[in-house]
Amino acid sequence: MTLILYGIPNCDTVKKARRWLDERDVAYLFHDFRKDGLDPVRLQGWIDTLGWEKLLNKAGTTFRKLPDAQKNSLDAASAKALMLEQPAMIRRPVVEAASGVSVGFSADDWQARFAK
């Protein structure tokens, strides 16, 4: 399976992750949430595997701009709808690889999973 890195190109964490992969000659495809969209079935698979709480980026400005009532009443369905409507609310990067799906960037974890 080809490693697929999902994110947005101007995200600093995505930039670090891509640089890390490039420096180690790890082949991957980049999927830009904003440009290429996001399949609801794929997002549901990530939610089933990782949990919506782990995928939803509560530290980002997009989330912080939400009304408090909306933030406080989140559940799996409303979080999924938010992430589909505004992919910037997804914690980045999301990586699909033979070893499974993960979210976020950790050089130590990635060294064990992806380095040749």
Image (tube, helix red, strand yellow):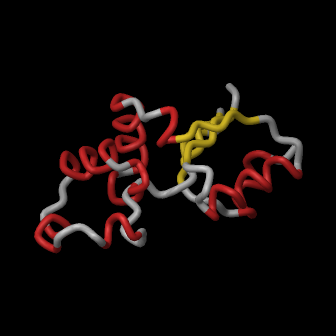
Q: In which image quadrant can residue 17 be found?
A: bottom right
Q: Residue at x 77, y 45 (%)?
A: 114
Tell me the quarter of the image containing the N terminus.
top right
Q: In which image quadrant can residue 105 be found?
A: bottom right
- Horizontal and vertical percent position of residue 61: 39, 70
Position of residue 113 in the picture relative to residue 35 (left or right): right
- Horizontal and vertical percent position of residue 13: 63, 62
- Horizontal and vertical percent position of residue 39: 40, 30
Q: Residue at x 53, y 55 (%)?
A: 92
Q: Is residue 33 above or below residue 54?
A: above
Q: In which image quadrant can residue 98 be found?
A: top right
Position of residue 102 in the picture relative to residue 73 (left or right): right
Position of residue 14 in the picture relative to residue 44 (left or right): right
Position of residue 70 in the picture relative to residue 114 (left or right): left
Q: Residue at x 42, y 35 (%)?
A: 38
Front residue of 18 and 34: 34
Tell me the quarter of the image containing the C terminus.
top right
What count of labels does the image hold? Answer: 0
Q: Residue at x 69, y 57 (%)?
A: 15
- Horizontal and vertical percent position of residue 54: 40, 59
Q: Which residue lies furthest to the top in this view?
A: 1
